[in-house]
Image (tube, rainbow, N blue to C red):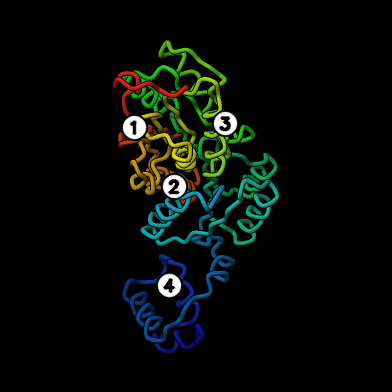
Amino acid sequence: MNIKEVARLAKVSTATVSRTINGSEKVTAETAERVRQAIETLKFYPNTNARALGSGRSSLYGLIISDITNPFFPELVKSFEDVAVQFGQEVLIANTNYDPHRMEVCVTRMLQRKVDGVAIMTSEMDEHLIDEMSSRRIPLVFLDTGTPQKGISNIAIDYASGIDAAVEHLSSLGHTAIGFISGPMDLTSARVRRRAFTNSIKRKGLKLDRNMIEEGNHRMDGGHEAMARLLDKEVRPTAVLTSNDMTAIGAMGAIFERGLKVPHDISLIGFDDIELSAFTQPGLTTVRLSRQEIAKIAFRALYDVKENASAKGAEFTIQPTLIERKSTGPVAARRGGKHPV
């Protein structure tokens, strides 16, 4: 099946078929409808690559994520694609696995496919890659790591408010010995969350014990190992806040392996509110970071810049919210029990 057969059936020129496919305003509504009916009858699928070459638009948006095995990112991908479909656009997904070389490969793929914009939902990206895309006037939007400027937007997460809410919740339950499991310190987002935790502890007038801060890797195995190290301390925390939900789920496993209970012996809070967190036993108290909100803002930031050449990059802020479930409770001593040390 080719464009000539579509033109013959619709009784128009091949140029008119091409204009219709590309959404040209030069084609009347009646003619465009006749062409679309011919396309549907013949089951003709336009060559989108050829369309991109002709129009300079691919109707394709890139989405770069860090770790496809972390449920946070598939949930983000789904939300981003849902918004893109509403606008008749497609999505090219790339997973870096926190690897700088893979990041470069991902960016190369985006350039080769002539994407109309890229949402960079990762913690790190080399400046030369940003410059490469910016020089080609490809709109960009970052998650918490970008600097707004022409063609570049940033979605800032108010980690301080989210972690403040978590610390306040634990403090209200009588916890003063609060531990923290961070992500890997070579990631900006992990350093930001750790700094937000230490600042929050100080603001609440609680004692900051750096011996109760351990580094994980944003995955379950890292959370398990970091929690095991905290449990080996001479003085254990009565509550632990983690850098993300995957870390908290791994930590929960380590606690159970020691014959301890959540929250009776140790309260636990995650960060992100992935879907799985509601179904752990007990359900995980966590700080919700809405993937739907991130995706909607990210896509619209790219789409608006592409549709309006005069549009400037912008800064958007997302406020996390605390979701209370069953993994947090009063400190053991307040229930008449003795907390293990």
Left or right of residue 53, residue 299 in this image:
left
Does label 4 or label 3 sit earlier along the sequence? Answer: 4
Q: Give above or below for 123 relative to 38.
A: above
| Residue depicted at x 35% and y 81% | 37
Does label 2 or label 3 sit earlier along the sequence? Answer: 3
Residue 322, disc = 1
Dot 3, crowdedness within 10 Å: few (<14), some or many (≥20)?
Answer: some
Q: Which amino acid does label 4 sit on?
A: Thr
The residue nearer to you, when weighing 52 against 248, is 248
Residue 304, disc = 2
Q: Which amino acid does label 1 sit on?
A: Leu
Secondary structure beneath label 3: helix
The nearer-to-camera label among 1 and 4 is 1
Alpha carbon distance from label 2 to label 3 = 48 Å
Residue 258: where, in percent of width, then height? Answer: 48, 36
- Which residue is situated farthest in the top direction here? 205
Residue 304: where, in percent of width, then height? Answer: 44, 47
Does label 1 or label 2 sit earlier along the sequence? Answer: 2
Does label 1 or label 3 sit earlier along the sequence? Answer: 3
Dot 4, crowdedness within 10 Å: few (<14), some or many (≥20)?
Answer: many
| Residue depicted at x 34% and y 41% | 282
Which residue is the site of mark 4?
Answer: 20
**Labelled pair 2, 4 in contact (Cβ < 8 Å):** no
Left or right of residue 94, residue 158 in this image:
left
| Residue depicted at x 38% and y 30% | 267
Alpha carbon distance from label 1 to label 3 = 26 Å
